[in-house]
Amino acid sequence: GPKGSWVLIKVGDGWSSAPLKLETPNENLTDSDIRFYGCIAKHQVIDCTDWVVNTLVTKSSARALGVVDNGRVLFTFGNLNGKEEGKGVDGWVLDKYVPEEEQEDGG
């Protein structure tokens, strides 16, 4: 399919994209173009860029590694609703998704 399109997204999968520059080669992107997304529930995708860059991989590293919009899972995370643990993809494992700013919701 076209670059940047996602066919199979499973809950717990995460990836990197430059949503406004889908056809731009990684080496021509700037950090401000790059975002990270994760699928936290069926048909529910969130932008988890701040968390990823603080926990996992920087935007410049993602760009250098060529993983932006490469159509592959970049990271996984587990402990979603207490289900299975995250399994590493390409060496990165996220074992929880608890962004600080959301911890106080739903009390």
Image (cartoon, grey):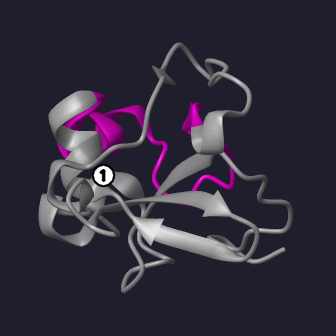
| Residue matched to label 1 | 27
Expressed as whole percent of the image width and height from the top left, the position of residue 18 reads: 38, 70
* Drawn side of residue 18 relative to residue 69, left or right: left
Please, what secondary structure does the residue beneath circle 1 have?
helix
At 60% across and 42% down in the image, what residue appears? 80
What's the residue at 72%, 33% (across, down)? 83
* Label 1 crowd bin: few (<14), some (14–19), many (20+), radius 10 Å: few
Region of the chain picked out in magenta, as a range: 56-79
Residue 50 counted in the magenta span? no
Question: Relative to 15, does residue 80 appear above or below in the rendering?
Answer: above
Nearest the eye: 82 or 60: 82
Q: Quadrant of the N terminus?
A: bottom right
Counting from the top left corner in percent of width and height, residue 53 is at 20, 41
Residue positioned 28% across, 31% down in the render: 57
In the image, taking residue 23 as reference, residue 58 lies left or right, namely left
The amino acid marked with disc number 1 is Glu
Tell me which corner region of the image, top left, top right, bottom left or bottom right, holds residue 60.
top left
Q: Residue at x 30, y 28 (%)?
A: 56
